[in-house]
Image (cartoon, grey):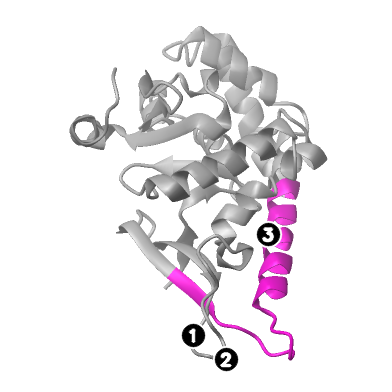
Amino acid sequence: MAVRMVSIDTPESHYGGAPATAQAALERTRTRLLDGTYDALPQDLRDYLVSRITPDAAQRHQAAGQAAAEAHTAMVADRLNRPDGSQRKMAVIATGELVEGNGRLLAYTAPWFTGSASDPLPPRDDPRRRTFNLDMVALGWAATFLIYPSIPPARDLDLLLEDAEAAWTQQLGAWNEFGKDLLLGYEYRACIKLGVREPADPAEAIGQAYQRVCVDLRTLTEVGLYGYHHVPPQHRLWIWATDLEQARTDLPISP
């Protein structure tokens, strides 16, 4: 079963087609954001997206996706390698909703320790216990993508947000190599959806692109379907609009 690394989002490397094809979709989105087609979106969000749909936005995004994949491959190879040259297994820790909309298992991944005398489980705070999800965020190759109800326990959440804050503040990884204005994975996918070649209905395209409400983790305040850009990436919590009422019961958030 394919695994989707939960709580993180790396740039896409193929979504939207080849860079030229994807860029054409982004340019259609940009035009529609400017010509009134998508005036149902707030002006500040339209301005924000237009500023990020640069002539090389698709190429940079997909290059960042490839670089992130390479960083993950290198990280896994390094951390699964034992001193004797043998390979440790990968631990897959399912969580939250278990299976996402595309049929992938939502999970954290980490090196597997047998717990035997010859391969003891390291202490909780030992760096060898860190998940690959966490390290991808810490190195700046993934943005946090916390989606209710798949929220880590408080201790793990604090560590994730701390590492995400450092990666964003220091502009590590993808931001360092491809620019602070790099479209994040979920932004890029939304813009590709808005750039569909012949949208039958602008409202339908917007509905496909924006289905999650953002919550500012600093204040636990909802910023709605279209206000996420006012919240730094590391402080965003996402809730499917269809889950919002239940989330308001389960979480101490306010509209």
Give me the residue at 53% from left, 39% from top: 161
Q: Which residues are drawn in magenta?
A: 63-92
Does the magenta segment cover residue 80? yes
Q: Distance between the residues labelled 3 and 1?
A: 27 Å
Element on which disc 1 rests: loop
Residue indicated by mark 3: 69
Can residue 198 be seen here? no
Q: How crowded is mark 2: few (under 14 residues within 10 Å), some or many (20 or more)?
A: few
Residue indicated by mark 2: 118
Asked whether 52 or 222 is in front, the reply is: 222
Asked whether 177 or 58 is in front, the reply is: 177
Residue indicated by mark 1: 114
Disc 1, disc 2: CB below 8 Å? yes
**Where 42 falls versus 179 (above or below)?**
above
Question: Could you tell me the amino acid type at mark 2?
Answer: Ser
Q: Main secondary structure of the magenta part?
A: helix
Question: Could you tell me the amino acid type at mark 1?
Answer: Thr
Q: How many labels does the image show?
A: 3
Of marks 3 and 1, which one's residue comes earlier in the chain? 3
**Where 62 falls versus 226 (above or below)?**
below
Disc 2, disc 3: CB below 8 Å? no
Of marks 2 and 3, which one's residue comes earlier in the chain? 3
Asked whether 193 or 238 is in front, the reply is: 238
State which quadrant residue 84 falls in. bottom right
Horizontal and vertical percent position of residue 41 = 45, 15
Does residue 40 appear to the left or right of 139 in the view shown? left
